[in-house]
Amino acid sequence: MLDVALLGTGGMMPLPDRFLTSLMLRLNGKYMLIDCGEGTQVSIKMLGWGFKNIDVICFTHYHADHVAGLVGILLTIGNSGRRDPITLIGPKGLKKMVDGMRIICPELPFELNMLETENITDNFKIGNFEINSLKVEHRIDCYAYNIIVRRAGKFDIKKAELNNVPKAVWGELQKKDKAEYNGIIYTPDMVLGEERKGIKVTYCTDSRPIKELVEFAKKSDLFVCEGIYAEDEKLEKAIEKKHMIFKEAAQLGKLADVKQMWLTHYSPALTEPELFEQDVKSVFEKVELGYDRINTKITFENN
């Protein structure tokens, strides 16, 4: 199962009850972040999740409201006792951004592995997190992310016997990439059926509602999408700033046929997004207005 939490739902500047943009995911005791706005470490503390096992941090882009919390996060992770490397993923310019930030935290007890996503789509595998990226439409290079948790097929005893796999490694092959017995290497495909439906979470901010996002978010278990303005009359401003209004985001979720959708990245002028809930639900019923530390548990389907 995958736990997902929005740590901050604000855009541009934090408010007393709203931190800046960040999403946290937890899988088998390991964590990842997407974006790291101001206040992220405080919100993690309030949520009660940990710091030490944050293995990967992805950045959509390098505007301050998405990265300004990085230094605090790195220092807090260091103070938690972590010594294993952390992977950072982001658009071109990642190293330059991180090096600039680290002027005020030059010493960390762990290494930073930096991976830049330069193509329109790139794929990464960090632990059990499979990360896909899509270049979207903002004022600077910006990427949406899919987080996919794959699920192996069921154990197939007939297949195992047909492939002459010893019973001694049946259990091992259901958990590991390979197993050795009497000098022979065996692999999971020799004992498992077809891969079952996994879990998919899509995260997009900041962007206009481009058509590629529909396919990218298709059938997501959870689609987290920006909606910086609620009012229809703000559409022209959203187009100018390369953002979305609520109804545009909801329409993306509807077209992508997602199971659940959260809106996030609200303008600081939008102090009561809940007033527009019924308006946006008229476009797509499965939309929920995100708030700081909203969280859910996504489980595998019974199959």
Image: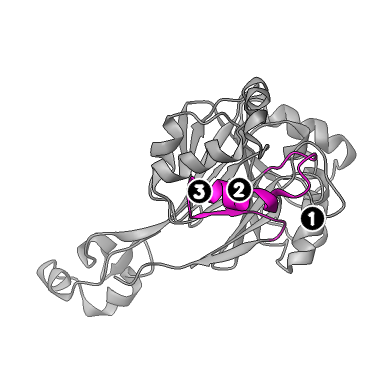
Mark 1 highlights which residue? 41
Which kind of residue does numbered mark 3 sit on?
Ser
Note whether 180 is above or below 7 in the view shown: below
Note whether 127 is above or below 212 in the view shown: below
Crowding at dot 2, Cα within 10 Å, few <14 / some 14-19 / many 20+, comes out as many
Q: Name the element at disc 2.
A: strand
Answer yes or no: is residue 86 visible: yes
Mark 3 highlights which residue? 282
Residue 275 magenta-highlighted: yes
Splitting the image into 4 quarters, where does residue 293 fall? bottom right
Which kind of residue does numbered mark 1 sit on?
Gln
Splitting the image into 4 quarters, where does residue 36 fall? top right
Q: Earlier in the sequence, mark 1 or mark 2?
A: 1
Mark 2 highlights which residue? 263
Q: Earlier in the sequence, mark 3 or mark 2?
A: 2
x and y percentages locating residue 65 in the rendered image = 76, 37
- Left or right of residue 244, residue 163 in this image: left
Q: CA distance from mark 3 to mark 2?
A: 15 Å
